[in-house]
Amino acid sequence: MKILAYILTVSIALIACSKKDKVYPDPYAGGRAPLGVTLSTDAPAPSEAAVGTVITFKGSGLLSHKDSIHFNFNGEAGEIVAVDSTGIQVKVPATASTGVTSVSIGDQVFIGPVFKVKGNLDIDNTWKGVVGSSSWVNDLYRFSDGRILLIGDFLDYEHKGVVKPIGRIVLISKDGEIDRSLQSGRGSDGSLSTIGALPSGKLVVGGSFASYDIHLAEMHNITVLNANGSIDSTVVNTFEGKDTVPAFNGGTDGNISRVFVHENKITAVGSFSYYEQYVYGISDYLHERDSLVVDSIPVRNLIRFFPDGSLDSSFNYNTALHRSNDGANGPIADACMQDDGKLIIVGRFTRYNGMDAPYIARINTDGSLDQGFGGAGADNTIASIRYNATTQRFVLAGVFRKFDGVDHHGLVMLKTDGTVDPQLTPLPMATDVSYRLAQQLNNGLIVVSGYFNKYGNVHRSGFMVLNPDGSLAAGYNNTADFSGSLTKVFETTNSSGQTQTLITGLFSTFNRVQITNVVRLLFK
């Protein structure tokens, strides 16, 4: 033991000497000499201007480097017009977008002020909302008088829910001011994701919730509201006596993401495995109350209800097995219903009822597969599908690279028969790009949101406007860097005939203006 201790002591001493004697290089030796350059962060002149305008930025030390200077507007190179001892003059390039400016000399970068590009798109100054909602806005319904019902995950809108939380549903004027006539009470106890209208004028809402207003644990992720926001209710005979309950008695065991109404029937898609319905008038023998007695039937991700909430067993259903057919073999991300009641679903699935359906399928009104829609389909996930009745075109967005065997780089336009419209040819996408939503407007322009920093070789971040052929629309670059996700692009026109779009989702700014989750844009 003494010998071992001696060896360890000597070893430690030698290691210590070795570390002490070793000479490390000076990390600052050979450092770059200061260039003596500064770029002022004071506002340029002018601080906001259109493409092609010459802008003056204050700075010093630039003149001696005038032949090696590069100037960028939010990552896009501008044409340097003049350099002197007081600063630099640069022309705004056609590809510029609102954002931070910078000067680079060699590998050194000097950050300048924010410059706002004037263009054809901006926040509509007639929109009265200045704060927005406290969380996701998932969907909206517009009444004939122009008022708008917003639903989502929020508990506050325009700071009006500070004292009494707004339960994920709010009525606003056509210009964004809160309308207190809504009789939603406590609202929902969980997320509201989707809304549709029945022929009666009543509204169907779906999401992830069990309670609405005073009706606690009385619904399964879907219910019907009166037009004033109150629950459509009825009186039933229960084990404990008469009770007022939601008139819509049915639902699912998981989230409902989209609902559609056709011929007074409600079709829903989402992430669920069972249809559920309360059975009134029967004791559960444990709690001696029937609100917990539930009848359940296996139904996967796609379902159709009658207006009272009962299951339509004529839709994709196996009567012998008392359950739905297999349906899609993966999640349904989005759907769109045609005027004839056929439903087009997209997502992360490759088969429907055992037949090939590569990430897209059109479903007949009986729930069977309408084979051939979309040709060979996509080679990867489709995140969204949107239809424009004016152009009669579907636009699909996702992470796919090919559609029907041809390169389409995350965006594709389909005709009503499911064939590809070749006019939309998007530019190649980077491997980490994900397009989440694309909506064509009546004028043909396409609004795209998602997770991206470039489109082709042009800096665009999270939001862009494309021409119908897939090229960047000139003049629609005053968007800055957009961080967030859109759930809805709802188009209207103002009194001058200009296009407006109400965008909803989860975001905190647009064109560097702080506004959360809902705002109206004006296309000039």
Image: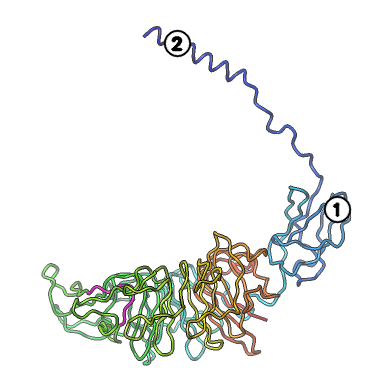
Closer to the camera in the image, 138 or 234: 138
User: Where residue 222 sits: x, y (%)?
Assistant: 33, 77
Q: Please give left or right for residue 510 compared with residue 68 in the image.
A: left
Residue denoted by label 2? 7
Image quarter hosting the N terminus: top left
Magenta-highlighted stretch: main secondary structure? strand
* Circle 1 SS class: loop
Rendered residue at 74%/59% (across/down):
72
Q: From the viewer's perspective, is residue 76 above or below residue 338?
A: above
- Magenta span covers which residues? 297-304
Rendered residue at 36%/72% (across/down):
270
Within-10-Å neighbours for mark 1: few <14, some 14–19, many 20+: few
Q: Please give left or right for residue 246 compared with residue 16 in the image.
A: left
- Confirm or deny contact between disc 1 and disc 2 (CB under 8 A): no
Residue denoted by label 1? 67
Q: Is residue 303 magenta?
A: yes
**Three-letter amino acid code at disc 1?**
Asp
Q: CA distance from mark 1 to mark 2?
A: 66 Å
